[in-house]
Amino acid sequence: MHILEFLVLKILQAVLCRLPLSTVRSAGRIAGGFVFKGLGFRRRITMENLRRAFPEKPEAELRSIAAQAFGSVGTTFFEFVWFPKWKREAIAGDIDVQHAEVLRDALSQGKGLIVLTAHYGSWEVFGQAICIVLDMPGTLLVKVQSNPLVDAEVDKWRRKFGNVTVPTTSIREILRSLQGGGWVALAGDQSAPKESMAVTFFGRTVSTFQGPAVFALRTGAPLVLGMLHRNVNDRYTLSVERIPHDDLDGSSEANIRTLTERHVRATERVIRAHPEQWMWMHKRWKHIAETADMGNSE
């Protein structure tokens, strides 16, 4: 099965890499829409998530958001498969950066930099965008794929412009990068184990990874939220926001909770503004029942 999955990926890559990027993106949107409307993959989960997140929106609008979200994920996936053909200058030319000085100033403090993002917009291009803006390769925290052949292939794509990839569990590598003054990027919006910290996200208390807050508080590294928004003309806007923690002394559980709440609220604000760009088909609220008794974080 692993070999078959790998061959399918390589065949898809061979086909897409013969096409211009604009066509690849259009094909990705169509494929994503077909998965939602034609195959119905995770359609129920997607619609349930949207109804609970936006109870004030009519059903027709929610279905439109869902279809666009699948189209966005399809575009991101096809862009990623096309990545071996992408040139650094082309990516740099397609990105409009908001508040680049936030990134540069934070990195200049010499304590390293934690760049938090979400599965929003073109998240696979995000790490390359940070590398280009800072003119410095960094460390990308990634989830290891169950198929080792596919894992090695996508790992090669992510490392194309010099970034290093490490598993999300590699605490030693994360600390080494931060202590050396480097930057570390990770997505913090996925469902965490049920014993993780409970934080409110879109009105529901859910298990949330506390790693970003723990590393920031224990190392003193600045924490920044960054998102790579895909515009209608297929250009990108890289938005950056500093998540302050200078007022939090030490890595007590209370301080970890406070900082986690801050970056989760900031993430929610971005997603609320453009919900069609987030991955609503993910089971983000999987552990809501288990965490409901752990306290509501306002």
Image (cartoon, helix red, strand yellow):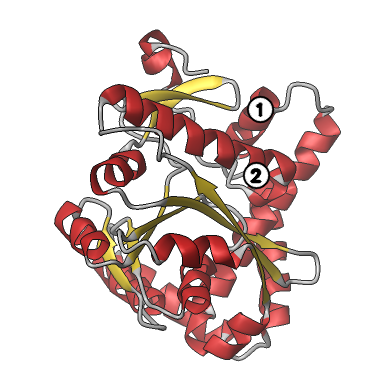
What kind of residue is marked 1?
Answer: Ala
- What is the x, y in percent for residue 258? 41, 27
Q: Is residue 168 left or right of residue 234?
A: left
Q: Secondary structure at mark 2?
A: helix
Q: Position of residue 160 (x, y in %)?
A: 40, 83
Residue placed at 32% from the left, 61% from the top? Answer: 112
Q: Is residue 149 above or below residue 201?
A: below
Outermost residue, top side:
293
Rendered position, 242 above or below 155: above
Residue at 24% across / 64% down in the picture?
Answer: 177
Instruction: Point out residue 189 in the picture as x, y percentages from the top left corner.
Output: 47, 42
Query: Is the C-beta separation of discs 2 and 1 under 8 Å?
Result: no
The residue drawn where x is 66% and y is 84% is 93
Res 53 label: 1
For residue 231, side relative to residue 155 (left or right): right
The alpha-carbon separation of the residues under discs 2 and 1 comes to: 14 Å
Residue type pointed to by label 2: Val
Question: Which quadrant of the structure image shows residue 252?
Answer: top left
Q: Quadrant of the N terminus?
A: bottom left
Give the crowd class for mark 2: few <14, some 14-19, many >=20 residues within 10 Å. some
Q: If you read the primary sequence from the N terminus, does the residue marked by circle 2 or circle 1 appear first?
A: 1
For the question of whether residue 12 can be seen, the reply is no
Residue at image mark 2: 270
Relative side of 281 to 111, left or right: right
Element carrying mark 1: helix
